[in-house]
Image: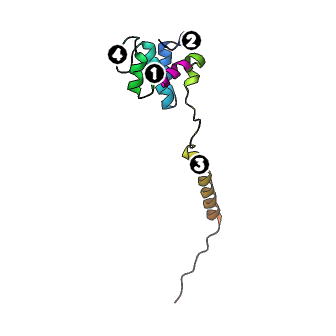
Amino acid sequence: MVRPDLQKWSLSLSSLTELSISAEHPRTRERLMALVLLSQGQAADGHRGPARCVERLHAVLGRDVHTVLKWVHDFNAGGPAALVYRHTGGTPPRRQMLAPLVRDVLEEARTVAAQPVLKKRPSTC
């Protein structure tokens, strides 16, 4: 049976629960909460008992059983820091792509706003 080794990292069940609640990213919260449930010996569907706990938990989470097992192994090897979500590839977040464009538009707007405005005189026809 694979279980998170809380004593190795000087954690209690309540401190692991607190970490899972206060984690910044939703994926980190999901991983840590899965470990909380495994440490309690129950799956997220409420069934208790050590047998097949990971199998039930993976079905409830909608994650592959190997993914949940990897979370446990990563935690046991590297502690809570090993489960912190890091963006490792793919398309960068849009705000990073749009930042230079927004900066250019703002700079152009400042330049236009700094120019004197020529007022037209009304025609006297």
Which comes before the other along the chain, label 2 or label 1?
A: 2
What is the image's colouring? Answer: rainbow
Q: Which of marks 4 and 3 is in front?
A: 4
Q: Mark 1 points at which residue?
A: 34
Tell me the number on the disc at residue 10: 2
Residue 9: image quadrant is: top right
> Where 63 sits versus 2, above or below?
below
* Point 49% across, 22% down: residue: 32
Residue 120 in which image quadrant? bottom right
The residue positioned 57% from the left and 80% from the top of the image is 121
In terms of secondary structure, what is the magenta stretch mainly? helix
For this rendering, which residue is in front, 18 or 6?
Answer: 6
User: Dot 2: few (<14), some (14–19), or many (≥20) neighbours within 10 Å?
Assistant: few
Which element type, helix, strand or loop, lies under badge 3? helix
Magenta stretch: give its range. Answer: 66-73
Q: Residues within 10 Å of mark 4 (few under 14, many from 20)?
A: few
x and y, in percent, of residue 91 in the image: 56, 43
Q: Which residue lies under the disc numbered 3?
A: 97
**Which residue is identified by label 4?**
47
Among the two numbered marks 3 and 1 on one chain, the one whose residue lies closer to the N terminus: 1
Q: In which quarter of the image is residue 55?
A: top left
- First-in-chain label (4 vs 1): 1
Residue at the image position 46 percent from the left and 18 percent from the top: 36
* First reached walking from the N terminus: tag 2 or tag 3: 2
Q: From mark 3 to mark 1, how far is it between C-alphas?
A: 33 Å
